[in-house]
Image: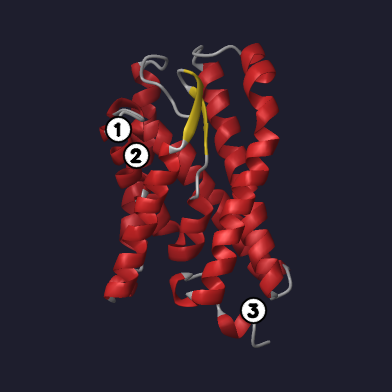
Amino acid sequence: MEADATLLSAGWRLAGYGLLLPALVAAWRTAPRDRLREPEMQHALLGSIVMLVALWWIRAGVVPGLGFHFFGVTMLTLMFGWQFACLAAVPVLLAGAATGHGDLATLGINALLLFLLPVATTWSLHRFARRYLPANFFVYVFVNGYLAAALSMAAATLSMAAVQVAAGAIGGAYLLGEFLPFLPMLLLSEGFINGAVIAVLVATRPGWVWTFDDARYLHR
């Protein structure tokens, strides 16, 4: 579900850019760029972004502004932290715009709601689990991977739906009857994809998952 330039006024589009730019500046200033000095980490980040671009191409459309596709943002957040996950919104959405799956006019609001909001949801749940839940491998995978991905997609989809209803682009009754009933199935699939990828990575390439600590989740 992405904002469509033909359905949102200029005010909504400008508001998206106005909120997005400060967030990207903060992400760039605080990003642990020294961790990307190793070529392996650079390749892992670029490969993850390419995988996200491909994942966002796989979609089913309903009407302009309504569609189904998986996010994969939770996976990226757990792998490289919230800063690089936020910054990845730009190349992913630019690639989508270049291939006809979006446009520059709504890049700001799409990045804000479909990337930054899921990143914030995932990161908040990760911090909560790290502080209050047992330091257990299965807790990490199921809470940070499966549950965080499902909640992130729910937050992004419902927020985008609320914006489009508030802007008068889509009727609330249509959303409730024709779009939102499919959301639970998408949430389960999103959780499975992200959780499965994270489980495989922490087993085979734990160095690529910056939020995973062997000493904390395994050796204890």
Mark 1, residue position: 97
Indicate the amino acid at tag 3: Tyr
CB of mark 2 within 8 Å of CB of mark 1? Answer: yes
As drawn, 204 above or below 156: below
Could you tell me how far apart the alpha carbons at marks 2 and 1 are, in whole angstroms?
Answer: 6 Å
Residue 170 - label? none
Residue drawn at x 53%, y 29% is: 160
Say which residue appears at 66% left-offset and 12% top-offset. Answer: 173
Residue depicted at 63% across the width and 50% down the height:
191
Along the viewing direction, whichever of 209 and 84 lies nearer the viewer: 209
Residue 198, above or below 25: below
Q: Which residue is mark 2?
A: 93
- Distance in Å between CA atoms under marks 3 and 2: 34 Å
Q: Secondary structure at mark 3?
A: helix
Tell me the number on the disc at residue 217. Answer: 3
- Dot 3 or dot 2: first in sequence order is 2
- Residue 57's spot in the image, x, y percent? 41, 38
Q: Earlier in the sequence, mark 1 or mark 3?
A: 1
Residue at 51% over, 62% down: 78
- Classify residue 56 as left or right of residue 153: left
Q: Secondary structure at mark 2?
A: helix
